Structures are given as C-alpha cells and as structure tokens.
Image: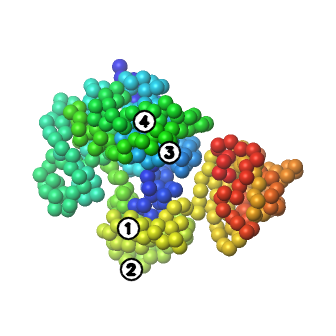
C-alpha cells in the first residue's frame, strides 16, 4: 500500500510577465485570472483530496508569506507547512529543502509531488491517469517529470525528447532541449516524440536525496544545514539564511534530472498552461463570438481576437484586433498579443527609472492575515487608504511619530483603542489619532469591517510604525 503523497508547491516568482497585474510583491500565482480562484488556490485545490494527499508544503519567501496563508484560508485548504526561503536559490535548493523538511516528519519513504503554483490545469480523467502512472514509477525508485503534449511550436518552453517506452506508460528520457528557436520548435513538433517540460515532478524522497547526494552534493549540504538551523515561527519554517545563501543557484533540471539515470517522463495530454504571457491568458480564457476575452468593467466594440482586462477602472475598447489592454489600479499596458512575451522588457525599463520603479514592485492593494488595505490617494504629505479587517481580527497596538490619522467607518463595527480609551465606532462614525499616540483597530463583529483612513504628516513611510504590542501576524499592520 502506497502512503499518502506529500504535495510541494513552489510559490516564488518575480511577477514580470503579466505586468501590470503582476508585480514583484504579487506575482501571477496570487492573481485571479481564470475562474473563481487564483492560480495558487487552484493548485491547492488540486491536491486537497485527503484520501490521496497530505496537506501541502508550500515553499515561498518572506514577501509572499501572508498571501500564502490568506489565500489558503480563503480556499478552505489546510497547509502542512510554509517553508520560507531567505534568498532565491532556484528550484534544486527549494525541492531539496522541502524534501528534508518532509523526511523529518514522515520519513524518506514518502512520495512527494512537486507542483508550480502558477499553472492552469484541467483535472480530468487524463490528468488522474498521468498522476497514477507517475506514482507507480516514483514508488519504483524513478524520478518522474511530466511532459505536456505540445499543440504548437512554442519557443517559451524547454522540451523533453522521449526514449524507450516503459510498461507503465511512462518513457525513458533521451534528452532535455533548451527553449528553442522557432525553426527548431517546428522541426520537433513535426518529428514527434517531443514534449514540453512542465516543471512538475514526482519522486520518493529517498530516491531524490540519493540523487542529490550523488549529482549535487553542495545543494544537499547547504539545504540540510539550513533546515537543521531553521526556526519555527507561527505557521512558518524560516530556513537559516547563512546556510541557505551558500547553496548553488541551479534548477533541479540542471542539477539532477539531466544527470541521473533514474529519470522518466510521463507524456501528459491534459489541458495545461503556465499562463506565462497575456497571449497565453487569452488562449486559456473564455472567448466571445468575436474571439475576445474580456473581464468585468469593460465595454468592447468593433474589436476581435483581443484580451481586455481591468482591476477597477472601466475600460472602453473600440476598433482593435489582436491587442492586449490590461489595467491595474495605477497602470495600463497596451500591446499586440503576439508580442506579449516582451512584457518583461517593458518591466525592466520601468524598474530602471526612479519615477516608475514603484510600478513594478507592489500593488496599491496589500493583504495581511487580519485583512488588507488599498491605497486610494498618495499625495504630498497625505495618504488615503481603504482598510478591511476580518471579523474577530485586530491590528497591532502601535504609534506613528510623524503622522496623524482619521478613521471613518463605512461598514461594520470597529473597536478603536486610542491611548487609554477604548470605544466602539459604527457606520458613519469617525476617530482622530494624534501623532505619537498609541492606537489599535479591531473588528469585534461578525461582518467585515471597512474603514477609510486618512493620514497626514511630514513622513508617511511604512517604517514610521513603532509597535508597542505585536506578534508576527501583526507586524506589518
């Protein structure tokens, strides 16, 4: 009997390819692009069958830790652990660290299923059959990768050429091919026997650790030390920074899969997309009779074969073809769908200019375990935010040395602490927080609390917060 699989979800990312909706502080896996869930939530739900899977281990970084917890809670999925990388060291280090963490809990006999958090996958009979083949091969000591059946000569993916067929339905791997030029992609598609490298894996922990020890011992040494010195912090496992920084920056493909003799590939014909460009989002979306994919808050006329998406501002698009028009709260991108692989170049230009670099870093909306906030106006010596607090949650007790604030309740009930005074505010009531005064906002009610916060002062930076009573979940209130 094969024990439950331990899913490992890789949830890092730079947030450049789907700008302006994705940012370095909020990459695409945490965005709701297709359907009712974000890509990360969709990944969690794919491994939520407790008859088959243990709760997922998520590998992410300090910046995304609250998004991980928040979105898992919204999806109603329990997590096994959240492993925080102090620095990015590519997938070999992340997978090795996760394997070591899992082996400490379950032992080395368990099978782990490594998944990217930003893929759109249709779970159907084909998907389940491919996973069953992978599980049999992993339990038999193989390192399994999933090869997606190509339907076009894509140049944005690496390829895998298959070798001999195995009895299970998997294949030996003849070779890995780097992202090809279009001419080579056309040749591989025509020849057959080539599959897109999906970046998804399945293997027994014991097999993985043996192969890492043989082919990438420096990775294993650094991650073992980082895990042994890790610190448990609420729901997070913080890997030791000094040890982890010494780990080679290398992918698991280069470090292990291209060197081992135990690698196999499962050809996978299920619907899959890494949604790595606006063109891919358009292809995966639900198109209207004019082949347009349009979100809410859009008006589209005399336009075809286009993607129109917005996160607030109403978009009116007329007389275009083959265009992506994408608006966030503070920026708009317009470009040809066929050129959407070049969005990263635009982001690099924006990031290099002091006047626009902030547009590549963070959204006006941020999320915290207690709720979140959206910056509405950010001017000279003033800032206006909409703050949302979940029922039963509270912010830290803190003070600001360079600004004062006004809180106006627009929905729900607020418990407001200012100095030694605690009072209840209801809709249309407000409070003033003087500079330097201790204060706290809490939601004692059963519905979401929404307030408008107006801050004024000589300095409004996030580091003008002096917490006087807080824990990790309250730190960035």
Mark toward the viewer: 1 or 4? 4
Residue 202 visible to an observer of this rendering:
no
Q: Quadrant of residue 254?
A: top left
Residue at position x 72%, y 62% in the image: 452
Mark with earlier residue (1, 3): 3
Question: Going from the N terminus, do you reach mark 2 or mark 1 first?
Answer: 2
Q: Secondary structure at mark 1?
A: helix
Q: Callout 2: 10 Å neighbours few (<14), some, many (20+)?
A: few
Marks 4 and 3 sit apart, C-alpha to C-alpha, by 12 Å
Contact check, label 3 and label 2, Cβ < 8 Å? no
Label 1 to label 3: alpha-carbon separation: 27 Å
Q: Kindly report the distance in space between the C-alpha atoms of the residues bearing marks 4 and 2.
A: 55 Å
In the picture shown, does residue 145 fall above or below 34? Answer: above
Where does the image place residue 363, in percent across and percent down from the top left?
Answer: 55, 61
For label 3, the residue is: 86
Residue position marked by numbered label 2 in the rendering: 319
SS under mark 4: helix
Q: Cα distance, mark 3 to mark 2?
A: 48 Å
Residue 282, label in figure: none
- Between disc 1 and disc 3, the foreground one is 3
Q: Nearer the viewer, mark 4 or mark 2?
A: 4
Q: Is residue 319 above or below residue 109?
A: below
Image depth: mark 3 or mark 2 in front: 3
Residue 11 locus on image (x, y percent):
45, 46
Q: Nearer the viewer, mark 2 or mark 1?
A: 1
Badge 4: how crowded within 10 Å, few (<14), some, or many (20+)? many
Circle on res. 223 = 4
Rendered image: mark on residue 345: 1
Q: Is residue 415 left or right of residue 473?
A: right
Give the farthest residue toward the left.
191
C-alpha span from label 2 to label 1:
26 Å
């Amino acid at each position: 009997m094969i024990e439950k699989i331990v899913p490992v979800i890789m949830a890092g990312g730079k947030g450049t390819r789907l700008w302006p909706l994705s940012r370095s502080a909020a990459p695409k896996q945490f965005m709701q692009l297709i359907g009712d869930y974000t890509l990360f939530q969709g990944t969690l739900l794919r491994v939520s069958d407790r008859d088959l899977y243990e709760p997922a281990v998520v590998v992410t970084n300090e910046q995304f830790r609250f998004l991980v917890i928040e979105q898992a809670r919204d999806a109603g999925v329990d997590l096994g652990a959240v492993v925080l990388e102090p620095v990015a060291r590519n997938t070999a280090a992340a997978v090795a660290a996760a394997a070591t963490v899992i082996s400490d809990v379950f032992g080395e006999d368990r099978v782990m299923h490594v998944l990217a958090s930003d893929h759109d996958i249709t779970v159907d009979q084909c998907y389940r059959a491919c996973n069953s083949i992978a599980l049999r091969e992993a339990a038999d000591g193989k390192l399994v990768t999933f090869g997606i059946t190509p339907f076009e000569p894509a140049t944005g993916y690496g390829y895998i050429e298959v070798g001999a067929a195995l009895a299970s339905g998997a294949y030996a791997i003849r070779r890995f091919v780097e992202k090809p030029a279009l001419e080579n992609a056309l040749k591989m598609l025509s020849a057959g026997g080539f599959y897109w490298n999906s970046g998804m894996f399945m293997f027994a922990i014991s097999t993985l650790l043996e192969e890492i020890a043989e082919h990438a011992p420096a990775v294993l040494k650094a991650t073992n030390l980082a895990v042994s010195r890790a610190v448990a912090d609420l729901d997070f496992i913080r890997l030791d920074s000094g040890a982890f920084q010494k780990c080679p920056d290398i992918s698991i493909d280069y470090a292990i899969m291209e060197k081992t003799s135990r690698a196999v590939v499962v050809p996978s014909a299920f619907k899959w997309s890494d949604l790595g460009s606006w063109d891919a989002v358009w292809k995966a979306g639900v198109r209207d009779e004019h082949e347009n994919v349009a979100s809410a808050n859009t008006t589209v006329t005399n336009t075809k074969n286009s993607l129109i998406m917005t996160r607030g501002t109403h978009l009116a698009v007329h007389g275009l073809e083959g265009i992506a028009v994408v608006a966030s709260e503070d920026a708009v991108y317009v470009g040809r769908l066929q050129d959407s692989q070049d969005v990263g170049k635009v982001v690099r230009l924006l990031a290099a200019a002091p006047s626009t670099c902030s547009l590549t870093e963070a959204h006006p909306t941020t999320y915290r375990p207690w709720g979140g906030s959206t910056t509405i106006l950010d001017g000279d010596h003033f800032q206006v935010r909409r703050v949302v607090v979940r029922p039963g949650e509270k912010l830290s007790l803190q003070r600001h040395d360079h600004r004062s604030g006004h809180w106006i309740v627009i929905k729900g009930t607020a418990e407001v602490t200012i100095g030694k005074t605690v009072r209840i505010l209801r809709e249309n009531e407000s409070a003033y927080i003087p500079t330097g005064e201790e204060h706290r906002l809490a939601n004692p009610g059963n519905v979401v609390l929404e307030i408008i916060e107006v801050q004024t002062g000589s300095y409004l930076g996030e580091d003008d917060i002096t917490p006087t009573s807080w824990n990790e979940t309250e730190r960035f209130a």
